[in-house]
Image (spheres, helix red, strand yellow):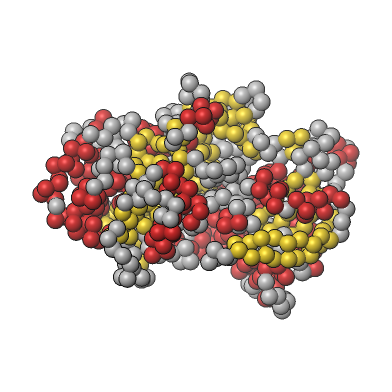
């Protein structure tokens, strides 16, 4: 910091941008790959782009306190949009780009958006369709001009034209812009982000400048983030994690945010950038591992042996080296050879050769999956957070990383455990309120600022680390009083590349049963190598050899779970492989790929009944939503398999 910009003046993201444009003027702030070429903008250029757009928004009539929806894939222009909206005293409301019109309509209506900034024609079309119900949107701005020429432009304007109008009006409006920007305070609203809606309608979480900046400052200092970091922005812009990593921490630490060309090129772009600071939910790490295992299946016998040998060695040595523990010369030598032959090339293939700090959160990660990446020498850590906490509740310090905890309270955060086992926290990042929902705000945050997370957990006395068991509503008892924690079992199942998703049932029942989704990429590759023809996911999912393979995975998980005295009763007795993938468009998952258990239990109640009544097969008809929004039905007869369950008396012995 310098005398011109002491910390007390950095009370908003636009203020941080002004500081960065002065102190880091020539350093890259954003990169975007388009048409196969990386384009770059410095902090000074970013400030110019944001100012031009902010002036254009003033000229368009954006008022203080207006809500402006921002919809599209990760790209610098949409990040600039959020900062420009803040600069004029309005509130950005990012939406999920893959949201269907019904979901988008709800958010636009709930927040009362007057303006919308869309990435491309697809998003504009959804907004136009939503306007049949939502009548408060005055103007739509679009960035990508492809396909937009024949639209009625009386209430639609291109991003470039808004910026050009802003630049033309600079002499007239710059004083007003400076006045609005200077009037921003620490307690003004910075952004409104909607929850994923796991249990009901999404709620608008109001986060202040204090929430965002204090959290960004504390978390950046925790991991010693600097202006030299590189990160890849590929997660939904509507998700709180992306907002903090790509705006909050990026603007506080002044590091560079890289935007991939598309979702399809993300892995290739990841390898080209080689980020030093990387975040991904467990599903991304699961997908990467699946690709690795598929490639190994196609490798020669010698390469498969080499991979298996060195990875087995790395399981115990890799984490010790990361934590700075003593390792024998022999083990260090073998690890060095493995690093040259296996670990190094594999990390390069994953795009993680330069990762200094990596995090996973959003869902619990399976311990086997977590340990796999740590064994490669990737400093992968877990954090525990929520939208309402501005992400960070706990983090894992270097040298104290374990797969069974989520770390210690983040700087400035207090954590306590209620009598019923629910985790509570309070911090500078604690949200202001749920927008226009005082009842939910009061039920979640008490007058002293303590927030109920809805998760069950406990704090270890010896280490002070927090351990999360499951969602408090999902942790329950089985018929015999044994603990039932489905997420623990599901994560173990998802470690196997052939299994994409799992949903375990057993609350108040005498045994556990499961739905399983196969991973079409992994299982399809296996089918191709074995000359097994199939015409659809449904057909492949019911192939006898596929069911046998999944049975083997379930039995292996049962054997592992049987060693845990507390959860041994959660072994899976029967399972079926679903005839369709669980899909957010069908309401079975959230946009952040969290399972909606209540919806699934109601929608597939006939399948659950068959699992528990001893049926060998079950016929079902299911409504699905196609990519173009049409509804249809798929029919299937599903096989039900019995798994091997290890008797609990044997466990006790």
Number of callouts in the render?
A: 0
The residue shown at (51%, 35%) is: 394
In the displayed structure, 527 sits above or below 90; it is below
Query: Residue 345, percent across and down?
Result: 52, 64
Query: Residue 549, percent across and down?
Result: 76, 63
Nearer to the camera, 368 or 533: 533
In the displayed structure, 80 sits above or below 579; it is above
Q: Quadrant of residue 207?
A: top left
Query: Residue 154, percent across and down?
Result: 27, 60
Does residue 286 appear anywhere in the picture? no
| Quadrant of the rendering where the C terminus is positioned | top right
596 to the left or right of 652: left
Instruction: Specify the farthest residue to the top.
Output: 448
Nearer to the camera, 46 or 568: 46
In the displayed structure, 202 sits above or below 635; it is above
Nearer to the camera, 205 or 558: 205
27 to the left or right of 353: left
Q: Quadrant of residue 482?
A: top right
Query: Residue 359, percent across and down?
Result: 50, 46
Nearer to the camera, 492 or 543: 543
Instruction: Specify the farthest residue to the left.
Output: 171
The residue shown at (31%, 51%) is: 138
In the displayed structure, 308 sits above or below 136; it is below
The residue shown at (85%, 46%) is: 646
Does residue 535 appear anywhere in the picture? yes
| Quadrant of the rendering where the N terminus is positioned | top left
The residue shown at (53%, 45%) is: 196
């Amino acid at each position: 910091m310098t005398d011109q910009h002491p910390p007390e003046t950095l009370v908003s993201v636009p203020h941080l941008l002004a500081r960065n444009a002065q102190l880091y003027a020539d350093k890259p702030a954003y990169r975007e790959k388009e048409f196969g070429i990386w384009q770059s903008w410095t902090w000074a250029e970013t400030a110019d782009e944001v100012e031009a757009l902010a002036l254009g928004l003033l000229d368009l009539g954006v008022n203080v306190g207006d809500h402006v929806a921002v919809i599209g894939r990760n790209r610098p222009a949409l990040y600039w949009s959020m900062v420009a909206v803040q600069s004029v005293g309005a509130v950005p409301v990012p939406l999920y780009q893959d949201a269907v019109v019904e979901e988008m309509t709800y958010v636009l209506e709930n927040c009362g958006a007057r303006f919308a900034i869309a990435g491309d024609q697809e998003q504009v079309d959804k907004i136009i369709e939503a306007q049949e119900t939502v009548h408060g949107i005055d103007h739509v701005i679009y960035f990508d001009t492809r396909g937009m020429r024949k639209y009625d432009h009386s209430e639609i304007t291109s991003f470039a034209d808004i910026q050009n109008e802003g630049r033309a009006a600079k002499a007239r409006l710059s004083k007003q812009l400076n006045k609005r920007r200077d009037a921003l305070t620490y307690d003004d609203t910075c952004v409104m982000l909607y929850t994923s809606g796991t249990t009901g309608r999404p709620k608008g979480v109001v986060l202040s400048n204090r929430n965002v900046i204090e959290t960004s400052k504390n978390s950046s200092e925790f991991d010693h983030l600097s202006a030299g970091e590189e990160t890849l922005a590929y997660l939904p812009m509507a998700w709180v994690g992306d907002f903090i990593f790509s705006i909050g921490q990026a603007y506080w630490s002044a590091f560079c945010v890289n935007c991939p060309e598309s979702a399809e090129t993300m892995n290739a772009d990841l390898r080209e950038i080689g980020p030093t600071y990387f975040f991904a939910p467990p599903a991304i790490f699961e997908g990467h591992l699946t690709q690795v295992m598929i490639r190994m299946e196609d490798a020669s016998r010698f390469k498969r042996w080499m991979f298996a040998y060195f990875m087995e060695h790395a399981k115990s040595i890799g984490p010790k080296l990361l934590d700075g523990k003593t390792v024998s010369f022999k083990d260090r030598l073998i690890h060095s050879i493995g690093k040259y032959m296996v670990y190094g090339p594999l990390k390069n293939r994953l795009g993680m050769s330069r990762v200094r700090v990596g995090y996973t959160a959003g869902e619990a990660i399976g311990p086997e999956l977590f340990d796999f990446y740590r064994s490669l020498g990737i400093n992968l850590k877990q954090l525990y957070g929520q939208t309402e906490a501005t992400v960070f509740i706990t983090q894992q310090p270097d040298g104290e990383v374990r797969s069974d905890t989520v770390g210690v309270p983040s700087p400035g955060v207090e954590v306590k455990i209620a009598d019923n086992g629910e985790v509570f926290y309070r911090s500078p990042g604690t949200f202001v309120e749920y927008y226009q929902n005082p009842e939910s705000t009061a039920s979640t945050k008490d007058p002293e600022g303590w927030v109920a997370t809805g998760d069950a957990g406990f704090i270890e006395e010896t280490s002070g680390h927090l351990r999360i068991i499951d969602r408090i509503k999902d942790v329950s008892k089985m018929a015999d009083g044994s603990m039932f924690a489905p997420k623990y079992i599901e994560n173990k199942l998802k470690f196997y590349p052939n299994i994409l998703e799992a949903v375990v049932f057993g609350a108040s029942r005498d045994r556990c049963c499961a739905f399983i989704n196969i991973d079409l990429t992994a299982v399809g590759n296996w089918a191709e190598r074995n000359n097994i023809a199939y015409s659809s996911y449904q057909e492949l999912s019911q192939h006898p050899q596929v069911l046998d393979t999944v049975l083997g995975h379930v039995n292996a998980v049962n054997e592992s779970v049987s060693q845990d005295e507390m959860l041994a009763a959660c072994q899976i007795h029967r399972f079926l492989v679903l005839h369709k993938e669980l899909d957010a468009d069908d309401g079975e998952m959230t946009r952040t790929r969290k399972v909606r258990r209540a919806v699934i239990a109601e929608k597939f109640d006939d399948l659950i009944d068959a699992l528990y009544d001893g049926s060998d097969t079950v016929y079902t008809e299911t409504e699905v939503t196609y990519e173009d929004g049409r509804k249809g039905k798929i029919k299937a007869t599903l096989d039900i398999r019995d798994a091997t369950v290890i008797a609990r008396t044997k466990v006790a012995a």
